[in-house]
Structures are given as C-alpha cells and as structure tokens.
Image (cartoon, grey):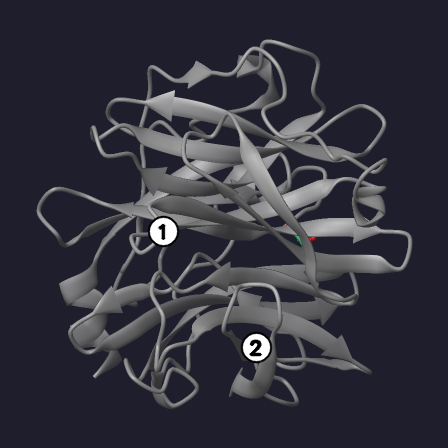
Amino acid sequence: MNNHHLELFKRHERNPILTAADWLYPANSVFNPGATLLHDGTTLLLCRVEDRRGLSHLCVARSANGVDGWDIDTQPTLMPDPDNFPEELWGIEDPRITYVPEIKKYAVVYTAFSSSGPGVALALTEDFHAFERYGMIMAPEDKDAALLPHRIGGHWVLIHRPVSGSSAHIWLSYSPDLRHWGSHKIMLAARLGGWWDAHKIGLASPPIETAKGWLVIYHGVRPNAAGSIYRLGLALFDLHTPEICLKRSDEWIFGPEEPYERRGDVDNVVFPCGYTIAADGDTIQLYYGAADTSIALATGSVHAILEWLK
Ligand code: BMA
C-alpha cells in the first residue's frame, strides 16, 4: 500500500493466524477474539465461533508465542445457555477479557444476542473452564463493552455502547458490585457528517492503562453505497476520571487493506476485541477479527502511539 502515514500497527506476516479450518469441530467462521496473557505467559484467545446455524459461541485457543502452535479446545468452551439465560437465545459474541486482581478472576464481557437485540453480559472465570455468569448487565441495544481492571473511586467501571436512534456513542457506567450499574456518562461521541467515525463508534479492545491515561482503540463504522467500513482510531482518557477525553486522533490509524480484511462474510471489517502486552512492557499484540471470517494479528508500541497522539 502506498500510504504515506506512519504505520502504528504492523500486520503479522502469517496473517490470518487462525481460521475455521484450524477448528477441531465444524465451524463457519472464527473472529473477534478476546485476548489475555495467562500468568505463565501463555497467550489465551477467547474466539467467537459462528456455527452453521449462524449462532455464535466462544472457544479458547492457547499459544506459547501468541502467533502459532495454537492449542484449541476440542469442544466449545462457553456455549449460549438460553434455558437459564434467555438473553443468550441467539448466541454470544465478541468477548472482551479483563484480569481483575482484586478478585483474582478474569472478567469476560460479551454480547448476548437476545430476542430483543444485543445486550451486554458478564461472566467471571479463574481458568476459562468454569464460568460464573452474572447475566445481562446492560439491556438492548448495547454491545462493545469491557470492564476496567480495578475500581475507580470505589466503583467498578464498565465501558459500553448503547444505541439511541441513529447515534451510537461510547458510554461508561459505574457499579458497587458488578451487578447494579448507574452514573452513566458519555465517554466518546461519534462525529458527524463525512467523518470516518461519524454516527456510530464502539470500543475495540479493552483500554490499555498507561502512565499518561487510559489508551482506547475504538472502531468507527462508515456506511456507504456498498455496505460499511470498520476502521480503528485512538483516544486517551484521564486515569482518575475516565469519561474525560484528553486526546483523540482525527484520522483512522488502521483499516481494511489486505485481502483477508477486504473480503469475507462481512467485507471491509477489522474488529479487535483484545490485546496482550509483551514482556518489554511496550509491544502491543492486537488480535482482531478480519471480515467476520478469520483472526489476524498486528503489532504496535504503546510508547510510539502515545507520542503520535501528542
Ligand atoms: C458489529 C459486531 C461485530 C461484527 C461487525 C461487522 O456490529 O456485530 O461482531 O464484526 O458488526 O459485522
């Protein structure tokens, strides 16, 4: 590509790193994975798997280097459970993982596709085998959510994306117990008019806590005559009052370019739900769904991104 802008995220040469062909049971597509680094350094991806009914569940893939040698669960790891959680009727999607030191558990925040539309659900796990479901914590229509890793001012903080009319902005809400949410605030508003991030935006991967603030990668959805283009932008938020935006990129910093991002079940989509930070404390490995069909990896530097955002 003859792009004269700075390349903040570099695609891995082995992209896409995971496809449905790698799965050990029948699947239509694998995409939009949550990610975390386990305490032993293993990269864990919690992948969205769409089956051949069109419904999604979640499945774990583990790798020592986060690139290849994936050890994929032989069965779905977390299936929708509509008998006990009717809001999961049409599947569970787009998990975002946050390790929460206070409770020594991983919080998995995902989209529950209910008969009333998509809402935000929460489950806690210690091992990605057993999950404790909290059910739907944000009613439809709401998605693109993640928990911050620790309380702020004594309260848990959830970032999410409710839809109201023709606009969809990023909000955050506070809770004393992870179940009851309030003090809702707009965190980042979609722009208007011809902008790449006009009208509809959403959180991409969970925020990255840096000395300068919460670094947020978000997606913007640009409709056009042929469909939509999902691209990524950057914003930085105050560490103590995360609804205060300190910086925001004007331009998108990553968008569909490669064939596996351009063509698939949904064309022109790059959709990260997770990242890991390497042992150097700086290198971000961003895992993203490509065209709702496969999983790809791009690498960046927290330091370089913060410098660019200045
Ligand atoms: C969004 C989400 C994502 C999906 C994207 C493109 O609304 O549903 O899961 O990747 O659309 O289809």
Q: In this image, 204 relative to 56: left or right?
A: left
Q: Residues within 10 Å of mark 2 (few under 14, many from 20)?
A: many
Residue 61, by quadrant, is top left
Amino acid type of the residue tagged 2 in the rendering = Ile
Percent x, y of residue 32: 55, 43
Label 2 sits on a secondary structure element that is strand
One can see residue 267 in this view:
yes
Quadrant containing the C terminus in the rendered view: bottom left
One can see residue 189 in this view:
no
Ligand 1 closer than 8 Å to the CB at disc 1?
A: no
Q: CA distance from mark 2 to mark 1?
A: 26 Å
On residue 170, the disc is: 2
Say above or below: 229 vs 87: below
Single out the mark in the foreground, 2 or 1: 1
Residue at figure coordinates x 59%, y 73% from the top left = 201
Residue at figure coordinates x 75%, y 25% from the top left = 51
Amino acid type of the residue tagged 1 in the rendering = Ile
Q: In this image, 120 relative to 275: left or right?
A: right
Residue at figure coordinates x 35%, y 87% from the top left = 241
Say above or below: 11 vs 68: below
Percent x, y of residue 138: 69, 66
Residue extending farthest right: 115
Q: Which residue is mark 1?
A: 103
Ligand 1 closer than 8 Å to the CB at disc 2?
A: no
Q: In this image, 304 relative to 275: left or right?
A: left
Percent x, y of residue 23: 57, 15
Q: Depth check: 260 or 301 in front? A: 301
Q: In this image, 139 relative to 74: left or right?
A: right
